[in-house]
Amino acid sequence: MAKITTRRERGGSEQDPAVYPRPSVAVDLVVASVSAEGALVVLLLKRKERPFAGRWALPGGFVHQGESVGMAAARVLREKTGLDDVELDELRTFSEPDRDPRAWVISVAHLALVPADRLSDVKPGRAAEDAQFCLLAPRDEPPGFTLRTAAGAVIEGPLGFDHDSILAHGLSRLRHRVTTTPLAFGLLPRRFTLSEAQRIVEAILGRKLDKAAFRTKILSLGLVRPTEEEKRGGAHRPAKLYVAAKGWDVAR
Amino acid sequence: MAKITTRRERGGSEQDPAVYPRPSVAVDLVVASVSAEGALVVLLLKRKERPFAGRWALPGGFVHQGESVGMAAARVLREKTGLDDVELDELRTFSEPDRDPRAWVISVAHLALVPADRLSDVKPGRAAEDAQFCLLAPRDEPPGFTLRTAAGAVIEGPLGFDHDSILAHGLSRLRHRVTTTPLAFGLLPRRFTLSEAQRIVEAILGRKLDKAAFRTKILSLGLVRPTEEEKRGGAHRPAKLYVAAKGWDVAR
DNA sequence: ACAAAAGTGTTCCTCATACACCCATGA
DNA sequence: TCATGGGTGTATGAGGAACACTTTTGT
């Protein structure tokens, strides 16, 4: 401390990284998906350890030396879910000084999009008591959503840390993305029908869209490329399968 | 180090912030403005000290304990320019492990918007050899822009650190914001004419806009509120002055 | 009167919306 | 042949682009 004062008093550099206390830097992940039933879901872990033991929270972990924040996010996602090669976007930092009761921790929140057909690949890590993709229903009052487990139980109380804020921010980013992109390719399987795409957008926005308008818009933007294949489902006409157009590969 | 291994081997927490090396966390600022002449400018400092001594770079500084990243950005802006109460938005983190030759430093880039009528308030700090708002001309090849000092001299070579990337990112964010908001209120004085607003948007986008279309769009969106006052300039009809509508205060 | 910038009206065109209708399939 | 979802056409209206025009000032 005396050293810092000395440096400052003699008009020295304020730019030497070594002289200041340093925070831990973490990544927290909003891992979102749309289930086969068309529900918007997000991955939550029930914490085993303090702080917030027994409370639900987003998956997260610390950034290690020698890796970038993005690499850390990918690694944490792999460790906690076994998933690789999913779309990962940085949201923003969450850095209120008291957001972690243990220490000074700055978190860089990320949004991860998991295609529905890869939900079954998820192998939760050992750090949590329970890991579930929870249904996310929009609500008017804060924090802006209600969470239910797959079994239907409402998740009580706020999430651990400031994860309610992070989740709300991720949700709002997801809604924004889906209106501008306007396909959340990260949530789609490699080959998909336009109806599947529309169901996903509808799940995220929480409202129905016009079929014809959706199709013409998607096709006119040139974001998708038709394949020769078809998807045969129930007792109805087969649907043409599409892939994301060049430059829109899921892995980016 | 042995302690970390032990904790991991006995299946202990990976969540204890204390056991890992910690990075320094910095903020770097893209301080943008549109000059009275209608040129898009950005604040650069000529570095006095290593690393990159003698090279131009964005203003930046470290996040201190007890403050959030946003507070750090506001403080650094105040220290380097004397400006307060300007719009400050987080861009994203820049965290390549070798981005700072001195040490492990993660930077959170921010975009600061300075109204043209406050450019004269800027009192550069002592840390830099020279501080200038430099003209930013878009270019096709990377890094996507050419920089000139106010005197007209071209700024040679890349900026220090990864600040070329940060500046390019800030510029693209600014262009995006101005098309969606669709007014960069942070760049406008408290009271402004619609022509002033249009000139700023044109400077950022680098192209002319239709006067009638701009006016009807701005007014129909209800983003501005007319005042009783007028701005009398040269030999021409006075312009009505507007303010940002409620909820769009510059200070946010 | 004229220049210069503020401010408005008009026409054209594109595109989103809503809705109706046909198509292909399994049962 | 019927139910189901895939796929397409068409009318309507809102909003953006381009351009011409009027208004108000200082000189």
Image: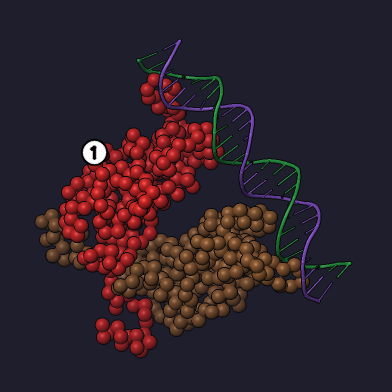
Chain colours: A brown, B red, C purple, D green
Left or right of A115? Residue A4 is left
Is there any visible trace of residue A196 in the rendered image? no
Q: Residue at x 27, y 67 (%)?
A: B98
In the displayed structure, B174 sits above or below A186; it is above
Residue at numbered disc 1: B151
Q: Which one is nearer the viewer's eye here, A181 or B186?
A: A181
Q: Residue at x 71, y 72 (%)?
A: A233
Q: Which one is nearer the viewer's eye here, B155 or B170?
A: B155
Q: Residue at x 64, y 71 (%)?
A: A37
Quarter where residue A136 is shown: bottom right
Q: Residue furthest bottom?
A: B10
Left or right of A220? Residue B181 is left
Q: Residue at x 47, y 45 (%)?
A: B179
Query: Label 1 lies in what chain?
Result: B
- Residue A190 percent location from the top left of the image: 57, 70
In the displayed structure, A231 sits above or below B179; it is below
Quarter where residue B110 is shown: bottom left
Rendered-image quadrant of the N terminus of chain A: bottom left
User: What count of labels does the image hold?
Assistant: 1
Is there any visible trace of residue B175 in the rendered image? yes
- Residue B211 percent location from the top left of the image: 49, 33
Going by the numbered disc 1, the residue's amino acid type is Ala
- Residue A216 percent location from the top left of the image: 65, 54
- Residue A115 percent location from the top left of the image: 55, 70
Q: Residue furthest front?
A: A228
Under circle 1, the secondary element is loop
Alpha-carbon neighbours of circle 1 within 10 Å: few (<14), some, or many (≥20)? few
